[in-house]
Image (tube, grey):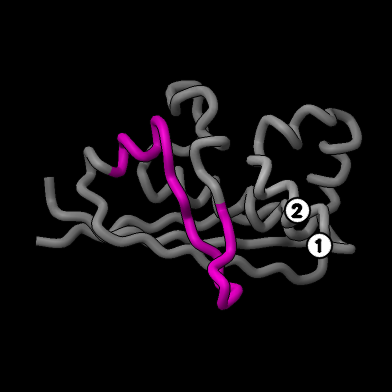
């Protein structure tokens, strides 16, 4: 039997911009090298960062944990959002998050990101075998 895991999150782009101005280390703490390289190459880089942050939070919600102290410390680094050559975003998971997916027998995962105006939104859907 298949179990569906879903998470959605929305990030305010101006709020993230202010956070990055106040705490420059958040950029390195929350995003991988490849994510930073991709996002910072865009004129509106904060909206791309906000989309990836929303996707990371949506992923953790889909897994039933959210970004809590018990979520493995560097969970944001364990979730990487890269782009397929077609342009669609893909979830790459490692570390604590990958172990959680194995525990939940995740067999498929998708992510969708959109941004408009002051907000970026993402949804993550995972399919897993019932455990």
Q: Secondary structure at mark 2?
A: strand
Q: Which residue is mark 1?
A: 118
Range of magenta residues = 81-101
**Which image quadrant for residue 116?**
bottom right
User: Considering only order in the chain, which callout, 2 or 1, is on the residue closer to the N terminus?
Assistant: 2
* Image: 89 above or below 53: below
**Which image quadrant for residue 43?**
bottom right
Q: Which residue is mark 2?
A: 12
Assess disc 1: are there few (<14), some (14-19) or many (≥20) residues with their C-alpha within 10 Å of its C-alpha. few
Residue in view at x 83 percent, y 62 percent = 42
Q: Quadrant of the C terminus?
A: top left
> Tag on residue 8?
none
Name the residue furthest front.
Answer: 85
- Looking at the image, residue 106 sits to the left or right of residue 25; the answer is left
User: What is the CA distance from the residue labelled 1 to the residue labelled 2?
Assistant: 6 Å
Residue in view at x 81 percent, y 69 percent = 117
Residue 121 in percent (x, y) is at 63, 62
Residue 48 in percent (x, y) is at 73, 59
Residue 91 in percent (x, y) is at 47, 55
- Looking at the image, residue 40 sits to the left or right of residue 80; the answer is right
Assess disc 2: are there few (<14), some (14-19) or many (≥20) residues with their C-alpha within 10 Å of its C-alpha. some
Residue in view at x 26 percent, y 52 percent = 106
Q: Are marks 1 and 2 in contact (CB under 8 Å)?
A: yes
Residue in view at x 65 percent, y 69 percent = 114
Q: Quadrant of the N terminus?
A: bottom left
**In magenta stretch: residue 120:** no
């Amino acid at each position: 039997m298949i179990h569906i895991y879903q998470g959605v999150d929305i990030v305010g782009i101006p709020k993230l911009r202010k956070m990055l101005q106040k705490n420059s280390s958040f950029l390195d703490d929350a995003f991988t090298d490849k994510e930073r390289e991709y996002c910072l190459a865009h004129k509106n880089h904060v909206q791309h960062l906000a989309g990836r942050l929303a996707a990371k939070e949506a992923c953790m919600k889909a897994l039933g944990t959210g970004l809590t102290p018990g979520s493995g410390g560097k969970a944001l680094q364990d979730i990487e959002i890269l782009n397929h050559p077609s342009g669609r975003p893909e979830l790459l998971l490692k570390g604590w998050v990958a172990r959680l997916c194995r525990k939940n027998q995740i067999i498929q995962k998708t992510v969708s990101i959109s941004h408009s105006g002051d907000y970026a939104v993402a949804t993550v859907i995972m399919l897993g075998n019932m455990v």
